Image (cartoon, coloured by chain):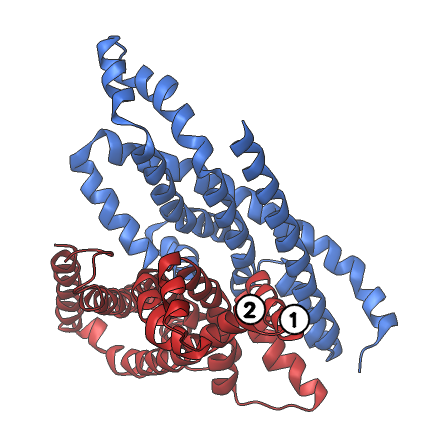
Amino acid sequence: MWIRMLTAMLAGTLLLIALLSANAEYRLFMPGLLEGAVLTVEITLLGAVLAVFMALIAALAKLYGPLPIRWLSTTYIEIFRGTSALVQLFWLYFVLPQFGVFLDAFVVAVLALGLNIGAYGAEVVRGAIVSVARGQWEASIALNMSKAQMLRRIILPQAFTAMIPPWGNLFIELVKSTSLVSLITLADLTFKAQQMNQSTLKTVPVFTLVLLMYLAISLTVTIGMRLLEQRASRGLTRGRVA
Amino acid sequence: MWDWTFTFEILPVLARAAIMTVEATALGFVIAATLGLVLASIRLAFPVAGVVVTVLVELIRSTPLLIQIFFLYFVLPKAGIVLDAFTAGVAAIGIHYAAYCSEVYRAGFENVPRGQWEASIALNLSPWNTFKDIILPQALPPVVPALGNYLIALFKETPLLSAIAVLELMQTAKNIGSETFRYTEPVTLVGVFFLVMSLVSAGIIRMLESWLQRR
């Protein structure tokens, strides 16, 4: 029922974009903005992959690593959750070169956003693992499974279902924080909008289109995550029933 | 690499900018907390208007704050409403987080047992009195920790105001950087400031949480 409403909202947004671009005043901006949107989607996808990777590593390290590794992952999580994403972006882009490390703006964007969302994700993963019922752990021990087997076969598959909704929120968060990369000279959707706004002063069409495009991207992510959730909770006694 | 004399030279300038950051946070959160409560109450009281609020909240939550700041700062003047950078920025942050806070309040309202509503009807209380004296006092305390989390999140979003040239911490650091070509110290100091402030306020919220639980 939610999926249907979200799909209707997405269809409405896309229709509105199409209708607006029939107007010459709006059509002018479409090619440039679409170019920016492609970069936004690219950064989102790569950032999401990095975030999931970092979150899994950090969560497992914090739960099962030896003490120094546990400290390391806690430090990573607290630093990236505790400072703002923009400061992290600027630090990697402006400060790192002072130490002789030169990174491409695109790499900085993916790195900063991926690490930032990954730190939040680590807590999500940790919470999901911890919330797997106690009996499941005990049964795996009783079946003489090694720790790796237990995690891979029993715990992670069940934790996965519990993780999906909070990850959905984090991915939306990621989509929205990609707008920050415009401030380190990457030509994403926001950057294009600012550029066009400054050169043509047609503020209303530019920013209206940009808002609608972000909405369309976010809604697509939300719908995707809901579908995944539906698929993952199939055959389980817990989780949302579709 | 790291110049301590330069660090102490820029520290007072950054400290002054930090006040601006704290001001923006406080004002933004006041807007977010009150407007959020209003939105949630509208949803509770008028189901028809509630649909409009739901769509509005969904809209605000799924578009970037940076774009909303630009929208208020660049688009509103076209409609004849001219806001200065600080007002536009604080309003945008406040409205953005009001959308999140309204969801928090909604969860609080839904947590109040239905018997409380029924008892208020039985006691012939007016809807307004029911809301003010029975529902709110029970709905608010459990959501304080969640609101606190959004306060920290909002605080960390204030560097966005640098994009419309509000002289808060990040903008000041950028200015120092472009004047002296030294970014290492100012940007790192800003990062440290945010980390310390976030950790301190997270601690305060945790204390508040345990205090509320004990009561």
Crowd band around label 1 with a 10 angstrom C-alpha radius: few (<14), some (14–19), many (20+)? few
For the residue pair B151 and B74, the one nearer the viewer reads as B151
Can you give x and y, in whole percent of width and height, for residue A78 in the image? 59, 63
Q: Quadrant of the C terminus of chain B?
A: top right
Q: Quadrant of residue A45?
A: bottom left
Pick the residue in front: A202 or B117.
B117
Say the numbered circle drawn on residue A67. 1
Residue at 40% from the left image edge and 47% from the top image edge: B95
> In this rendering, does residue A160 appear at all?
yes
Q: Is residue B58 left or right of residue B7?
A: left
Q: Residue furthest top?
A: B123
Q: Amino acid at mark 2?
A: Lys
Picture residue at 27% right of the left edge, 77% below the top: A29
Q: Tell me whether the residue at label 2 lies in contact with that at label 1, contact meaning CB atoms closer than 8 angstroms.
A: no
Same chain for mark 2 and mark 1? The answer is yes
Residue B199, placed above or below residue A109:
above
| Image chain in blue | B
Question: Which residue appears at 69% of the width and 56% of the height?
Answer: B17
Which x, y percent locates residue B48?
15, 36
> Which color is chain A depicted in?
red
Which residue in the protein does label 2 denote? A62
**Label number found at residue A145:** none
